[in-house]
Amino acid sequence: MKDREADTAELKTLVSEVEGMSLSIVIPAYNEEGAVRETIEHVREAMDPLGVPYEIIVVDDGSEDQTMEIARQTGVIVDSNQVNTGYGASLKRGVKRAQYEYVAIIDADGTYPPHYLPGMLAMCRDQDMVVGDRGAAMKNVPWVRKPAKWVLNTFASFLAERKLNDLNSGLRVFRKSELVPFIPLLPQKFSFTTTITLCMSCNGKRMIYTPIEYGKRVGKSKIRPVDFINFLILVLRMTVLFNPLRVFIPLGLALMTLGAVKFVYDIWMDNLSETTIFAFLSALIIWSLGLIADMISRLHLRP
């Protein structure tokens, strides 16, 4: 009885906090016939008690199974990339089609519980983006992917100059007007959420994390071995697009220090070597490239 009263009081609080708000929920789906219907049903169960306008947009990414047909049977808005274009492409299509200012994204594979959406929507009233932090729940991520995720999170936090708890969480709520200017920068593939996080954090947008649970996915993962190459490309893109001087200045300083040490040694030996000259020139070139990358970054990320 006490639990029921507590749930009722919590619901009343949420209803008052989201009053006057509305939400577009974008669900990218690729071969998710085993989970897409259940995901849609759970989203409705979470949103219906709030009494606020909302819409569900499922974007099919060229599925080879019955994903699109099942989604249509539920009565939600269904769009399609027609061919398999990528996770990011599906989200961009869904965001562009969304009619409301507040937009949520959630995967169709059952890993993200939709019951967090009302609370995240309420928090987003005073934020530009609210991200679901999987935290300890990341134990469900395959161990072979954990080292890459750790490297990516650490490097991104270094670039953003703030702690990024969960760089590529697939559950988040944001203001459409704040994201639209960055859409041309967002990639077509899995690094979409990573790039969103860096766009927001490196451009001074208000972004907070909220703890969530993370379930075991329904169906097979879409990650392939070739995505390691995409991972390397993402790291390079992050370097030149988001706060590049954070990387280029220390790298140039390291080469300049090496050149200085070698120069002192060469003076001692009375023989100026090519290595010393190469180190000094390399430092100057890297600093020059860093300044150019910083200028381009500021042009792309300006408000």
Image (spheres, rainbow, N blue to C red):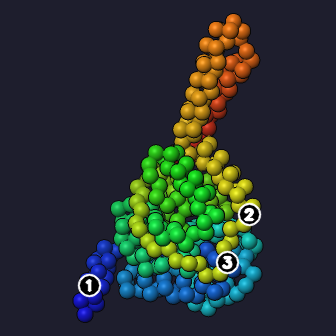
Residue 141 can be seen, yes or no = yes
Residue count near mark 1 (Cα–Cα under 10 Å), binned few <14, some 14–19, many ≥20: few
Foreground label between 1 and 3: 3
Kind of residue at badge 2: Pro
Q: Which mark is residue 220?
A: 3
Amino acid beneath label 1: Ala
Residue 69 percent location from the top left of the image: 67, 88
Residue at point 56%, 45% (across, down) = 242
Mark 2 and mark 3: Cα distance apart in space: 14 Å
* Residue type at the position of mark 3: Lys
Q: Position of residue 185 (x, y in %)?
A: 61, 53
Sequence-earlier tag: 1 or 3: 1
Residue at image location 61% in from the left, 74% down from the top: 28
> Is 48 on the left-hand or right-hand side of 146?
left
For mark 2, give the secondary structure.
loop
Count the numbered circles shown: 3
135 over 301 or under it: above or below: below
Q: Is residue 103 above or below residue 72?
A: above
Residue that carries the numbered disc 2 in the rendered image: 225
Q: Position of residue 45 (x, y in %)?
A: 44, 87
Q: Secondary structure at mark 1?
A: helix
Task: Name the front one of labels 2 and 1.
Answer: 2
Q: Is residue 303 visible?
A: no
Split into 4 quadrants, where in the image is the N terminus?
Answer: bottom left
Q: Residues within 10 Å of mark 3 (few under 14, many from 20)?
A: few
